[in-house]
Amino acid sequence: MAKRAAPEINAGSMADIAFLLLIFFLVTTTMDVDTGITRKLPPPVENPDEDVDVKDRNVLKILVNSHDMLMVDGKRMDIRQLKDKTKDFMAIHPDNSEYPEVTTKYIEELGKEFPATKGVVSLKNDRGTSYNMYIQVQNELAKAFNEMKNEKSMELFGVKYTQLVDDQKIKIINKLVPVRISEAEPEDIGGQ
Amino acid sequence: MARFKVKKGKGMPGINTSSLPDIIFMLLFFFMVSTTMREVTVRVRQNMPEATEVQKLEKKSLVSFIYIGEPKNAKLFGTKPRIQLNDVFAEVDDIPEFVAKEREARDEADRKFITTSLKVDGATKMGIVTDVKQELRKSGAFKINYSTRKKVEKQH
């Protein structure tokens, strides 16, 4: 008997199979990119009774109450002013007792000493504060620090911080403009 | 003598569909590469707050998620904000175990890079979030990320 040629496989339904797979993947996967504000939590306090002594003038106290109202250093403030207030507070003001103390910091990479502020931003919120408000405040603070980093970077390297590629330079800016946001120990949890 | 062929029944020729599977496969591969599998069914309401200063979360495999918000099924679970770990509702006390398990699941070298992403509904009160943060501190998961949507800033 003569050898018969193998019959061609009908590929007409291939598209349907592929469609099926495609729809399966469309349904079970998500495309959203996760974005957010990254923060580092402090390690737990070993001895809650021991208070770290920080001078009053070195701390910018931000309080958010359960009605989402903002108080900065004893005065009520609108959230839109918070960024400028933070920037002003963390800027270098030599010999001004209204502002935090100024020290000098030696930066190895540049072999020079730079003035540095001792200022710390302290953020304290109520248990009733809404998460929305908390994020707004965190965002304004992040904006203030990012702008300061940008300015410092422009001053030293002529490029914005966000456009820096050199790790060394990024490190220098991070040393010169440290993000110092301290979150107070929640009172009803930390201490009795 | 030339003869003209009389065309009979001038219907549209059928479109060649033999490359259709290839096109669909291309689409399929695009979606397979650019998307990620949905791992958990989120059972709490997630209306994220907006922020401008956001960073992208790198290395998805090193991120563990904690969802907080009002349960979607209010009839069954009430309206009090709840914590969701993996696929189930949990209490604040369950967090250390969750952190330990997440750590176990990663390579030893990667363990210190684990980020905990807090996916919290905007309407939630800070009380529960603070409790979660305290538990995370105690269990040594210091790197956290407040998940927010990116807001496009108005130019003025």
Image (cartoon, rainbow, N blue to C red):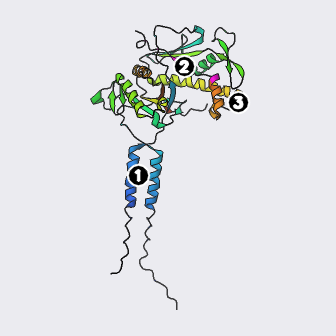
Amino acid type indicated by mark 1: Leu
The first of marks 1 and 2 along the sequence is: 1
- Left or right, A174 with respect to B84, comes to right
Same-subunit check for callouts 2 and 3: yes
Q: Circle 3: is it few (<14), some (14-19), or many (20+) Cα within 10 Å?
A: few
Give the residues drawn in magenta, as a range.
Answer: A175-192
Visible in this render: residue B99?
A: yes
Tag nearer the camera, 1 or 3: 3
Mark pair 1, 3: CA separation: 49 Å
The residue shown at (44%, 56%) is: B24
Q: Chain of mark 3?
A: A
Q: Are marks 1 and 3 in contact (CB under 8 Å)?
A: no
Q: Which residue is mark 3?
A: A157
Mark pair 2, 3: CA separation: 26 Å
Q: Chain of mark 1?
A: A
Q: Are marks 2 and 3 in contact (CB under 8 Å)?
A: no
Q: Circle 1: is it few (<14), some (14-19), or many (20+) Cα within 10 Å?
A: many
The residue shown at (39%, 50%) is: A23
Indicate which disc residue A22 carries: 1
State the residue in front, B30 or B74: B30
Identify the element where label 2 is drawn. strand
Identify the element where label 3 is drawn. helix
Which secondary structure is most common in the magenta stretch?
Answer: loop
